[in-house]
Image: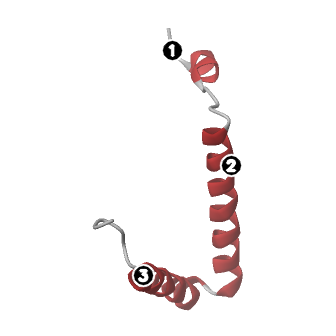
Amino acid sequence: MKNKIPNSWLFGVLGFILATLLMTVGFANTFWILILTILASVIGYLLDKYDFDFTPLVQIFKRK
């Protein structure tokens, strides 16, 4: 496990990003950014878990 990032670095960077967002865009906007990011992550996780294939959807919008 040499390539594992230590939790202190991971949460340090996460805290820095969160503090920067809070200071620049405010609490309410930061809250919505976090909610939408978590929602998108859950949707991506579920699509990977159930092996969803986007090929039929892409074919509908693909130019011929």
Report, in whole angstroms, how far the alpha carbon at label 1 lies from the one at label 3. 42 Å
Q: Earlier in the sequence, mark 1 or mark 3?
A: 3
Whole-percent x, y for residue 53 in the image: 61, 26
Q: Which residue is mark 2?
A: 43
In the image, 51 versus 25, the foreground residue is 51
| Relative vertical location of residue 64 with respect to residue 9 in this rendering, above or below | above
Disc 1 residue crowd, few under 14, some 14–19, many 20+, Cα 10 Å: few
Q: Which residue is mark 3?
A: 13
Report, in whole angstroms, how far the alpha carbon at label 2 lies from the one at label 1. 27 Å
* Amino acid type indicated by mark 2: Ile
Q: Which residue is mark 1?
A: 63
Whole-percent x, y for residue 26 in the image: 63, 87
Residue at far left of view: 2
In the image, 53 versus 9, the foreground residue is 9
Along the horizontal axis of the image, is 44 left or right of 20? right
Label pair 1/3, CB-CB below 8 angstroms: no
Label pair 2/3, CB-CB below 8 angstroms: no
- The image quadrant of residue 38 is bottom right
* Amino acid type indicated by mark 1: Arg
Q: Residue at x 69, y 78 (%)?
A: 31
Whole-percent x, y for residue 61 in the image: 59, 21
Q: Residue at x 64, y 31 (%)?
A: 52
| Relative vertical location of residue 37 with respect to residue 60 in this rendering, above or below | below
* Amino acid type indicated by mark 3: Val
Q: Residue at x 54, y 91 (%)?
A: 23
Report, in whole angstroms, how far the alpha carbon at label 2 lies from the one at label 3. 24 Å
| Relative vertical location of residue 46 with respect to residue 52 in this rendering, above or below | below
Label pair 2/1, CB-CB below 8 angstroms: no
